[in-house]
Amino acid sequence: MAVMDCKSVSAQIRKGELANLYYFYGADLVQVEAMTRQLIKKAAGDNLTLGLTKYEGKDLDMQALSDAAQMFPMMAPYNCIWVHDLNAEQCREEQLRQLLELCSDISGQTVLLFSVTGFDVKDGKKAPSGKNKKLIDCIARHGIVCEAVQKTLPEIARSLISGAQRRGCLLQKEAADELAARCMGNTVQLQSELEKLCAHANGGEITEDMVVSLVAPSIETTTFALAKAVISMRPAVAMAELDRLFAMRTNRTFIVHSIASAFLDLYRAAVAWRSNHSPEDMKSDFAYRHDFVVKNAFRDCRRIPLERLRACISVLRDLEQTLNSSAADERILLETAIVKMLEIASGRQEIRS
C-alpha cells in the first residue's frame, strides 16, 4: 500500500480506515508507542484479553503467529495481532520466508502490527538493510510502514509547550529549548522530565532557571559543552564539565569516546562549511538523528581553524592509547589532554605535522 508519516497514519486510524498490516519504527519512541496504542485500541476495542494477541519478537513462534492470523475476531472489531521488537536479522532464512509469505497473505478482519522500540532498525545507517529491509519492503507493498522521525528542536519545543499547557503549566520557549537540548531530543526522557517540572511548578510557570536546576544534562550534552569550552578557550568551564562527567559516574572509556565524538561533530561541520555544504547535507551523509546536534556543530566549528580541530582529535587518540596501555591515574590523564587541547585551540602549542 504505502509508506506514510505519523500524522497521516493517526488520522487514518481515527477514521477507522484500517489496513491489515502495519510496521511502526523510528527514533521518536514516544510517537511509535502512541501510534501502537491508538491502533490497538481501534482494532481490538476495550477488551484486550479477547481482542489482542501479543508476541515478543525474540521468542516469536511462526506457527503460532500463522495460526493466530487465521482466527476470526470474537468480541472485538478485528483480530488484532501485535509483534513487538522483531529483529528480522535474527530470523533463519526459512523463518523469514514464512514471515514474508504470511505478510503477503493477511486479509479479512485481521490486523497484524509490527512495532519496534527496543533496537535501531537502521543500525546507525541511513536506511534499514538486510532482512529487516526485506520485511519492511514487503509490508510497504501489502500494508503501511511508518517511521517516526526524530523531531527538530523547534518541533520538540512546541510539543513540550503544548504538553505543559495540558498539565496546567506555562512553559516559555527558552525553557523548552533548554529542556530539549539537555535531553538530546530523547522523547522518552523528555516526557519524564516534563512531568517532573510540571509537578514542581504546580500550575505555575516553568522557567529556564528551573530547567537548569532540576534537569541534569545528558552525557552527550555535557561532552559537547566540554568540547565547546575547549575551542572557546575557557579552561574553567572545560574542567567544570569534566567534573560533571565524573560526578555522573561515567565510564572513562565512554567519556573519551563521547568527547572524541563531539570533536568529530565539530570537524565534520568545519569541513562541510568550508566545502559549501549545508547542515542538512551533513545530517544526511552521517545519519545524524538530531538536527540541533548538527546545527550546534555548524555554529561552533568556526571558532577554531580546521587544522587545530584535527590536532585536538589526535590528542584524544593518543589519550585513549595511553589509557589502554598504562596504569596512570585516569583523571590526571584526562585533565592533561584537556590542557593540551586548550593550548592547541589558543595557538600556544605548535601543531605537529
Image (cartoon, grey):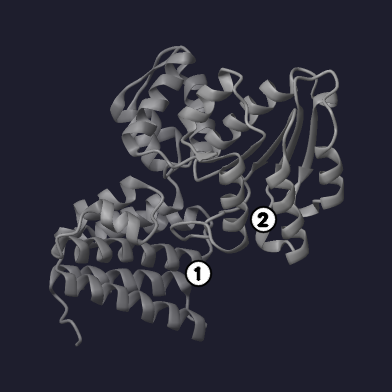
Q: Residues within 10 Å of mark 1 (few under 14, many from 20)?
A: few
Q: Vertically, is 129 above or below 175?
A: below
Percent position of residue 196, x then y? 52, 27
Residue at 47% across / 14% down in the picture? 166
Percent position of residue 297, x then y? 26, 55
Apparent side of residue 144 relative to residue 112 in the rendered image (left or right): left
Percent position of residue 292, x then y? 31, 46
| The C terminus sits in image quarter | bottom left
Q: Vertically, is 106 above or below 119?
A: above
Residue at 73% across / 38% down in the picture? 82
Residue type at tag 1: Thr
Q: Vertically, is 112 above or below 279?
A: above
Could you tell me if residue 159 is visible in this image? Answer: yes
Quadrant assignment, res 175: top left
Dot 2: element: loop
Dot 1: element: helix
**Residue nearest the observer in this picture, 284 or 262:** 284
Q: Residues within 10 Å of mark 2 (few under 14, many from 20)?
A: some
Apparent side of residue 53 relative to residue 186 in the rendered image (left or right): right
- Distance of label 2 from label 1 (alpha carbons): 29 Å
The disc label shown at residue 253, or none: 1
| The N terminus sits in image quarter | top right
Query: Which residue is the site of mark 2?
Result: 87
